[in-house]
Amino acid sequence: MKSNGFGSKGAKCDLKLNDFKVKFRPREEVYHYSVSIEPATKRPICRKVLMKLYEIYGQQTLMGKKFAYDGEKSLFTVGPLQFSSKDFQVLLDDDPERDSPVNILPDILL
């Protein structure tokens, strides 16, 4: 993007973005869900928990719907999930002593 002389002073730096490509038909609604993982933990573990949740419950309970998860509290789907609130138990393979209760609640319709 052309800067028209702005931003020409100072030091250059590398910029890393956290983004991902999302494909969906524009006429479908995107739903935002609030996710709670207990005990609360860091993003990489939360992502593992949600990946495991999809592996276990994805085809039946989540109806095979793919979702986007921010690693903290937000989960997005195209179209609604078939429940208003749901608790899941997820046991990570690399830490069998620790199970993570996951609660998914509808938050905001976008």
Image (cartoon, helix red, strand yellow):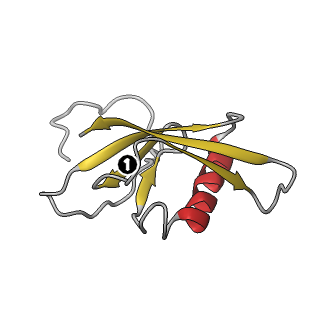
Total numbered labels: 1
Q: Residue at x 48, y 45 (%)?
A: 70
Q: Position of residue 88 (x, y in %)?
A: 61, 49
Say what secondary structure mark 1 lies in.
strand
Up/down of 59 relative to 39, above or below? below
Q: Residue at the location (48% across, 70% down)?
A: 59
Question: 91 or 75, which is in the foreground?
Answer: 91
Left or right: 68 as drawn, with respect to 42: left
Question: Label 1, on which residue?
Answer: 76
Q: On the picture, is 97 further left or further right than 14?
A: right
Foreground pick, 26 / 105: 105
Q: Residue at x 30, y 33 (%)?
A: 8
Query: Residue 25: which quarter of the image?
Result: bottom left
Q: Is residue 37 above or below residue 99?
A: above
List x then y, in percent, for residue 106. Answer: 38, 39
Name the residue at 39% across, 64% down. 65
Give the image location of residue 72, x and y in percent.
54, 38
Q: Residue lying at the far left in this picture: please name it.
A: 27
Which residue is nearer to you in this view: 14 or 48?
Answer: 48
In percent of width and height, residue 93 lies at 78, 63
Lateral position of residue 106 relative to residue 26, left or right: right
Q: Is residue 8 above or below residue 48?
A: above
Mark 1 neighbour density, 10 Å: few (under 14) some (14–19) many (20 or more): many
Residues 72 and 82: in front is 82
What amino acid is at disc 1? Phe
Quadrant of the frame with the C terminus: top left
